[in-house]
Amino acid sequence: MKTSPILYVIITTLLLITITIVSAMDLPFNWVFYITVVGQVSIVLMVYKVLTDNYSTNKTFAYFYEDRPITSIVFEAENENTRS
């Protein structure tokens, strides 16, 4: 069974949030240090898994945001003096 890279992202995020909570609770330094080292290793593993995932799509930048099409925005200022 193939593991999705999103699982690594979720685990790493929860681990890093745990580091923040543990350091705020004044737990002993060695606990914070070891969890930080494990967090750094998990970040490297997460980046590797995400970048080596066999994911392909046939979408291009023409699809950019599917829920909101990109349109040109024209700003018109009041009392604007045009240069000639």
Image: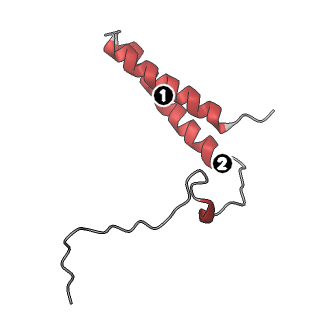
Q: Nearer the viewer, residue 84 or 63?
A: 84
Q: Position of residue 13 (x, y in %)?
A: 50, 29
In the figure, residue 78 lies in which quadrant? bottom left
Q: Residue furthest front?
A: 79
Numbered badge on residue 39? 1
Q: Amino acid at mark 2?
A: Thr
Instruction: Looking at the image, tell me whether mark 2 or mark 1 is earlier in sequence order.
Output: 1
Q: Is residue 69 left or right of residue 22?
A: right
In the rendered view, tell whether residue 51 sits above or below residue 71. above
Relative vertical location of residue 27 with respect to residue 73 in this rendering, above or below: above
State the mark number for residue 52. 2
Q: Tag 2's secondary structure?
A: loop
Residue positioned 51% across, 35% down in the render = 43
Secondary structure at numbered mark 1: helix
Q: Is residue 9 left or right of residue 75?
A: right
Q: Nearer the viewer, residue 20 or 38?
A: 20
- Identity of the residue drawn at 57% across and 34% down: 9
